[in-house]
Image (cartoon, rainbow, N blue to C red):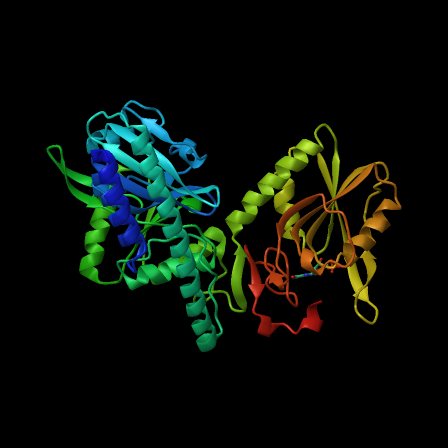
Amino acid sequence: MGRTRRSYYSALKRITKVANSALSLRRICNSVAKSTAKAMQANGCRILSLNPQKEYLITVGAYGLSDLYLKKGPLEARKSLPDILEGKVVFIADAAKDERVQHPQIALAQGISSLLGVPVLGKGEAIGEIRIYTREPHQFSEADKSFLLSVADICAVVFERAELHQLLEQGYKANERRRKSSQVSPLPTTLKPTSFAHPSEEDFAGLLDFYCIEWLYEPRSFPLRWEGDKIAEMFTPDFYLPELDLYVELTTLKQNLLTEKNRKLRQLRELYPEVNIRLLNKNDFLKLLAKYGYGPLGEAKVEGIDRVLYSHAKIQRRIRTLARRISRDYAGQRLMLIGILKGVVCFMADLMQHLSLPVTLDFMAISYYGGDGQVVKITRDLDSSITGQHVLMVEDIVDTGMTLNYILSHLSAHNPASLRVCTLLDKRARRLINVPLDYVGFEVPDEFVVGYGLDYKGEYRNLPFIGILHPELIKDEEVR
Ligand code: 5GP
């Protein structure tokens, strides 16, 4: 056996052993990064995990790289070597000159020349990456690549096991909380570096998770002062919230800490005026969430809401996609949007603003009567004629399909030029009548949802997100 194969063999033995140990995700990944870098005679190694929306890469383990390099800012998956995430192996001979490198000046400061990156694939899809760095220009052999791909396979198993562990643990904690206070948190959706420096950071992360607000923990360090070429002082804010493009530093009210943090923040703002950063204590962060449309918030979470299904930002992203498709499908035509009051108000208002077509608007109102409450009566009909018009029926939620079925037959009797349906939510599991849905925002589980226009006994319509109501709050027959 050649030297390389021998050292790769013993490195793989070490790596599988640590991967199968009871250590935390971060410690396993740090150790894997170290063994990998040493076996490849490289200067650094970094293991990254991709968030479920496939937007950001989060460092879960590293070896041989400075804090400044590791915390050079959130790595956007689409910008940072997208080829790796498409399943390809990427080799960069000169990191300082290659335009695929997102922060070349920092790579230069770190003294990085060559880089080899491979995807971590779980069930055939990219769930992360491993990158190897060398200080001297280096060519990697086929054996090097094949070794790194094997390490990536081991990392995939480690990631999936850690995710399963987190799910089980959160499920356990949620059950405990449910038992104690009948409040539940959603299950986590991303591998998170769970070792927070302070309990208040964990609380903040929990609140962000509850509202489905994407966050990254300490993704960037900002150099504040230099002595010659060396960085003498740095500042690493606790969180970055990509949807708000906001860095957050949490603080207590202890005056000496506050003064010091305020000084650093002033300096940071002077040096990096483009960076949006806030120093928050606990009350501030509740107010801030409210200001950014995650309110109205009481003490902490909205009373009665079991968990948030779709954040405001996620709803907006989905609406933009739907609006693009509708604008494309009806290009060159005029469109008449019809909604049923009142649940559709938020969706209609946001959707129409993103349509690049001439549109007109009309509303109907209905009520239910009959023994099972499911016979529909129109209490307010349209103001204008739809004959010969292209009509798009805009719905908040389609449940059994009875309402929509009735409305569609009422509308088609007036001979529109075309009649299609766009619904924000599709509760397919409860469908009784098969109604055609042309545009669907989200398929929701069979639970009672409120917010973003949808109500329970007239309330909750003003929540900017869509959430699930505590099952204990609803008596089934009252709302369905
Ligand atoms: P369907 O006739 O399809 O069974 O029901 C349609 C109407 O029922 C919707 O327009 C909505 O008013 C109401 N609905 C059905 N499911 C839900 C839900 O989960 N939350 C709320 N707030 N309303 C619902």
- Give whichever of 401, 152 is nearer the camera: 152
Say which of 208 and 148 sits in front.
148
Name of the residue lying farthest toward the front:
1
Look at the picture and state if 112 lies above or below 378. above
State how many labels appear. 0
**Residue 344 screen position, x and y as percent:** 67, 52
Q: Residue at x 36, y 27 (%)?
A: 100
Q: Give how far across and how far down residue 108 sits, in percent.
A: 22, 29
In percent of width and height, residue 209 lies at 44, 57
Q: Please indicate whether residue 388 sits to the left or right of residue 276 in the image.
A: right
Tell me if residue 65 can be seen.
no
- Height in image: 374 above or below 146? below
Q: Kindly identify the residue that appears in the image at 65 percent across and 65 percent down.
A: 458
Task: Say whether residue 82 is visible.
Answer: yes
Q: Name the quadrant containing residue 234.
A: top left
Specify whether 262 is left or right of 304: left
Say which quadrant the C terminus sits in: bottom right
Q: Is residue 183 above or below residue 125?
A: below
Image point 79% across, 56% down: which residue? 433
Q: Quadrant of the N terminus?
A: top left
Q: Position of residue 257 (x, y in %)?
A: 20, 58
Instruction: Name which quarter of the figure residue 283 lies in.
Output: bottom left
Ligand 1 lies in quarter: bottom right
Q: Residue furthest bottom?
A: 180
Image point (46%, 51%), residue name: 292
- Most distant residue in the left direction: 228
